[in-house]
Amino acid sequence: MGSGEHQNKLETLQILQAIIEAIDRRDEIFQAIEAAESEAEAQEAIGKVLGVGSVRSHFVLNMQARQWTRSGRARIAEDIEQLTRELDSP
């Protein structure tokens, strides 16, 4: 795997991990969004709740509702496992 491909997979993995954490902490995330005056403020609040930067908080804010379901979370978890295996293989 080339360094560019490795970096892309690593970034995708980090985004998916932030999404899983957001799903697991949905009450905090929804409270932060509800308290925000704007999308930009909501994105910043999500970043603070999860301890992530603007790219990952942007992806969390833009999640589709179906991803919050148990099956949606399971699919994301499977993607994380796959990416982790790919990143760990030589």
Image (cartoon, rainbow, N blue to C red):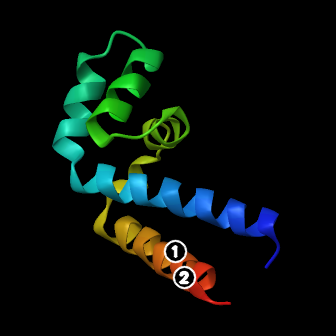
Relative placement, left or right, of 24 versus 78 is: left
Report the front residue among 4 and 67. Answer: 4
- Amino acid type shown at disc 2: Gln
Q: Quadrant of residue 67?
A: bottom left
Residue receiving disc 1: 79
**Residue extending furthest bottom?**
90
Query: Which residue corresponds to the image point at 70% horizontal and 60% vertical from the top-left?
Result: 8
**In the image, residue 23 lies at what x, y percent?**
29, 54
Residue shown at the point (51%, 32%) measured from the top left: 54
**Is residue 35 depicted above or below 89 in this figure?**
above
Quarter assignment of residue 11: bottom right
Q: Amino acid at mark 1?
A: Asp
Disc 1 packing (10 Å; few <14; some 14–19; many ≥20):
some
The answer to the question of whether label 1 and label 2 lie on touching residues, with beta carbons closer than 8 A, is: yes
66, 24: nearer the viewer: 24
Query: What distance separates the C-alpha of mark 1 from that of mark 2?
Result: 5 Å
Position in image of residue 25 (x %, y %)? 21, 49
Picture coordinates of residue 2, whole percent (x, y)? 82, 73
Residue receiving disc 2 = 82
Residue under the image location 45 percent in, 19 percent down: 39
The one nearer the camera, 8 or 27, is: 8
